[in-house]
Image (cartoon, rainbow, N blue to C red):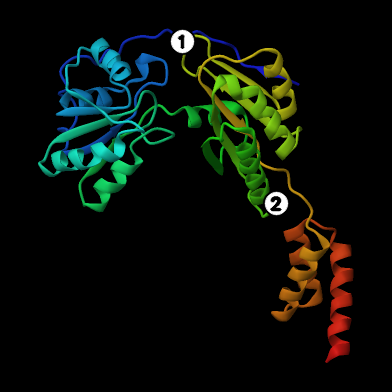
Amino acid sequence: MTELANATPHPETESAAAGPATAGAPIPSGLTLVATPIGNLGDLSPRALATLRGADAVLCEDTRVTGAMLSRHGVAVAMVPLHEHNEDDQTPRILARLRGGERLALASDAGTPLVSDPGYRLVRAAIAEGLPVHAVPGPNAAVMALTLSGLPPHPFLFLGFLPPRAGPRAAAIARLRASERAGLAATVILYEAPHRLAETLAALAEGLGGERPAAVARELTKRFEEVRRDSLAGLAAHYAAAPARGEIALVIGPAPEEPGSEAEMEERLRAALAGGMSLRDAAALVAEATGLPRRQVYARALALGRGDAKGS
């Protein structure tokens, strides 16, 4: 049954910490990754604001987005574009500034830098040179969606965006399903564009099973925040009829436990018996590992034991 969270308004308020950045330790030299609001401007922490204000420059995905946020807080600081298309070219210049002892902050358009956002290549390069890298924690849509989903919070697997085209997307879902069959049991978190949500949900329902529990979290921390919880099939049907808007995180419950196959049972039994375990102990161990009935596993262990005895 579909469950819809209350769409409680979240007024976008400015931080009260817009005064001088005097609290806490001085801003360190090096590169500092700064998490910024994913919607509600009140979620910018005092430490994040102090770091942005005290930086020699702010590296940002889109200077218009970050510039508007900084302007709201009365922060005037140089901004340097750093995005998917120029990160390789900008990295040597930024590393040179870091070597000179500058304090540089990195902020993406929203949320925690590097999480489905630019900056990974720069961070790897800075670490490789032994340059200091710090972080100011804060908002993250994936983790917030997980906590609101009602699904098991750990372990979880964050996959970012699936491929946008149908073929590669189906292949990615098939790889995930293969990992689950091999033993992966984790809640899965994805991001998706609103215009692809319905078709992605349909592809997930086909590849993972339509009854898998899931949640779609939309416009988190914003005025029209919404979390819809249902099966993958139910969510696919809903969003096919009522297209979504806004920023979206999708959370999928872990794969249900599946009984092991006969071949897996026999392979595990042979290994256990070869290791010197008794028939009873081997059967108990393999039954627990595969989910197969203990009586069935013990009968097969007896048969294997007789076969080994005949062959000796």
Q: Position of residue 275 (x, y in %)?
A: 69, 79
Q: Position of residue 171 (x, y in %)?
A: 64, 43
The quadrant where residue 232 appears: top right
Q: Is residue 222 left or right of residue 131?
A: right
Q: Is residue 217 left or right of residue 24?
A: right
Q: Position of residue 8 (x, y in %)?
A: 53, 9
- Name which residue type carries label 1: His
Image quarter (top left, top right, bottom left or bottom right) of the N terminus: top right
Residue found at x 67% / y 50%: 178
- Name which residue type carries label 2: Arg
Q: Position of residue 299 (x, y in %)?
A: 89, 70
Residue found at x 67% / y 18%: 239
Residue found at x 11% / y 40%: 101
Q: Is residue 96 left or right of residue 177?
A: left
Q: Earlier in the sequence, mark 1 or mark 2?
A: 1
Question: Whole-Å distance between the Cαs marked 1 and 2?
Answer: 41 Å
* Figure check: 13 above or below 203: above
Q: Residues within 10 Å of mark 1 (few under 14, many from 20)?
A: some
Image quarter (top left, top right, bottom left or bottom right) of the C terminus: bottom right
Mark 1, secondary structure of its residue: loop
**Disc on res. 10:** 1
Front residue of 120/249: it is 120
Where does label 2 land, which residue? 181
* Figure check: 110 above or below 190: above
Q: Is residue 244 left or right of residue 71?
A: right
Residue found at x 53% / y 14%: 225
The quadrant where residue 286 appears: bottom right
Mark 2, secondary structure of its residue: helix
